[in-house]
Image (tube, grey):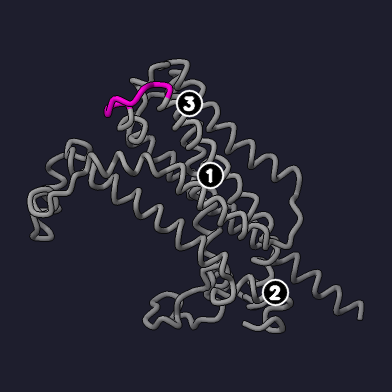
Amino acid sequence: MSNSAAGGVNESIVNWHQNAPLRRFLFVSGLLLTWIACDLLLQALTDINIVGSSTWMSLERAIGIDVRRQLFDVWQIDTWRLHLYTAYSLPALGLVVLILLDRLVSQGESGLPRMVSWCGGAFIVGGAILDIAVTVAHSPDLEMEGNPYIRVLLDSEHSLPFVYVHALVTQSLYITLFCGIWLGFLRHRETIAQTITAASPRTVLEFFKAATGGAHLTMRGWIFPIHPSEVPMMYHYIWLIAIPVVFGISLFRWYAALEWLGVVEPEPMTRAGIVLHGVCSALVVYFVAMWRMTREVTLSGVQVMDGK
């Protein structure tokens, strides 16, 4: 995509090959999420009661592999040690991702809207602080804490002060990371809108195609990518995925605080529903905001042309 084709968009920001901070942030954050997901999956396999033994038996029959035997008897994976090492690594990994995010955010060319910035930040920080505060108030020794990485530190007989310090550092880093993602989106919002506008979408489907980084693709390539050249622009997917995840998790933290306060009952399905609701709602708001900004960019461009 050239600057002229993109309507003045800074190609060095949008283009995957030219934006090293974008590549580094995606690689490291993706590695972190994959590591955590694999660790939690192995913990679920170790304690099959988490999802029910019948579920794992059905899965193993479907794929024809005794997953637990392969992992724990043949490969002899020490899930406890891996879980503990993952807990140790979280502060360091969070700091690395935060540094890489800062470099990506600094590329943004838009000013921060004060009210929107503060409201989003207050929602993220407020939910986290309330969740932490009511947890400590109701369980100062953290024996009722459900966070798997706090639990493994407690169960491995680390001192309570050590667990508190570890949790404080980790929570501070990841709250800052979430706020950084929010501010990063706001700093990049006009660039995202300009890339969508440059595609001149005429229908809702074409708008979604451009908003998901597929403006340069055919409709078939966007829906069913076959060749590497048909991969959408990853610049769009950073914000498209990160913003809903940030607000989905933040909404859950508000809900978790209400559970501690006895306002709502702790139900696993309800918890999953709250996260899903937060993710879907943020995704809808994201697309609506991009639609409105795209319209504004188009109208401003028309007015400039009329002025000439």
Q: Position of residue 74 (x, y in %)?
A: 8, 54
Of pointers 1 and 3, the one earlier in the residue sequence: 1
Q: Secondary structure at mark 2?
A: loop
Q: Position of residue 137 (x, y in %)?
A: 47, 16
Q: Nearer the viewer, residue 163 or 186?
A: 163
Residue 162 falls in image quadrant: top left
Q: Residue at label 3?
A: 257
For badge 3, the amino acid type reads Ala
On the rendered image, what quadrant is the C terminus found in?
bottom right
Q: Which mark is residue 247?
A: 1
Marks 1 and 3 in Cβ contact (< 8 Å): no
Q: Secondary structure at mark 3?
A: helix
For badge 1, the amino acid type reads Phe
| Apparent side of residue 82 relative to residue 272 in the rendered image (left or right) | left
Q: Position of residue 247 (x, y in %)?
A: 53, 44
Give the magenta range: 154-161
Q: Nearer the viewer, residue 212 or 50?
A: 50
Q: Residue at label 2?
A: 9
Q: Secondary structure at mark 1?
A: helix
* Count of numbered circles in the view: 3
Comparing labels 2 and 1, the label whose residue is closer to the camera: 2
